[in-house]
Amino acid sequence: MLPVLAPSHAVARLRAARLARSSKPFLARGGIKGARCDGCRLVPSHCMCHLRPSLQTVSGMCLLMADIEALKPSNTGWLVADVLAETYAFGWARTETDPALLALLADPQWQPYVVFPAEYVAPERVVQAVQEASGSSAKRPLFILLDGTWPEARKMFRKSPYLDLFPVLSLSPSQLSRYQLRRSRRDDHFCTSEVAALCLELAGEVLVAETLDAYLDVYTHHYLRAKQQLPVQREGPASVRWCGLGLAA
Ligand SMILES: [Zn+2]
């Protein structure tokens, strides 16, 4: 049985299913040593389960995860599922497709967008904006994120014919650089939760986007401090920003 605080979200379920299929334990390279909390994957002394927000949103996130992605402690799709109640996650395989994924993509309440860089896609498929989901007939945006290494993401994009029907949402260089400036980032590799935040921003869900970014900062802080075997700084910048959002203790 799982402890009371463990989330039952899509990424946690995918991780549990993937672990159950492993014949040998997954050993993360360079990760934190010792027992982990089932709720947040951190060591118990650095647990951040009490912060998990779970917000209701108009947009949905659909994570297609490469084979061992859900097992990696550095995977931030987990954080997306923590913050957005409406997160779906599926393991990706070239030879088989989960019928539940196809059912989700066919659900008329959603307008799926595949999030992928424009330079790899026929221009007529590329969009840089999201239709506002207002009015009774409007569809809710469902962002499909290909979660894995870049070669894995490219393979998923090329070898998933069921994605060919949907527009490709490509984050514009100006949006990316504004984001880099705001977050004082030096490189242009964005992790899954950052891409999700950028999509939410495009969909007009700015507060949720901000929450996700702040939650990533808190997670990064807890993760690094655990790795360095130092206590969490309750008054550190990540924590201060998080508390400023007024969501939780
Ligand atoms: Zn925890």
Image (cartoon, rainbow, N blue to C red):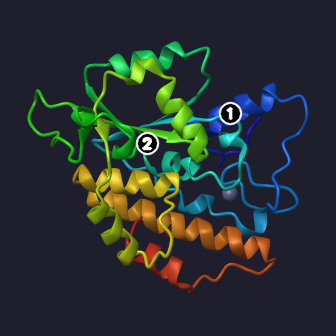
Residue drawn at x 31%, y 37% is 168
Q: Quadrant of residue 56?
A: top left
Residue drawn at x 63%, y 51% is 75
Looking at the picture, tell me which residue is in the foreground, 245 or 178: 178
Query: Residue 40: x, y in percent?
Result: 66, 54
- Image quadrant of ligand 1 equals bottom right
Query: Residue 142: x, y in percent?
Result: 33, 35
Does the closest atom of ligand 1 sit within 8 Å of the Cβ of label 2? no
**Number of other residues with Cα within 10 Å of mark 2, as a class: few under 14, some 14 to 19, many 20 or more:** some
Looking at the picture, tell me which residue is in the foreground, 86 or 69: 69
Question: 139 above or below 151?
Answer: above
Which amino acid type is marked by label 1? Asp
- Identify the secondary structure beneath mark 1: loop
Where is mark 1, residue-wise? 67
**Number of other residues with Cα within 10 Å of mark 1, as a class: few under 14, some 14 to 19, many 20 or more:** some
Q: Quadrant of residue 10?
A: top right
Q: Is residue 8 at all visible to an observer of this figure?
A: no
Q: Quadrant of residue 167?
A: top left
Residue drawn at x 41%, y 65% is 247
The outermost residue toward the right is 24
Which amino acid type is marked by label 2? Ala
Q: Which mark is residue 57?
A: none
Looking at the picture, tell me which residue is in the foreground, 1 or 111: 111
Between discs 1 and 2, the one toward the N terminus: 1
Report the label total: 2
Where is mark 2, residue-wise? 85
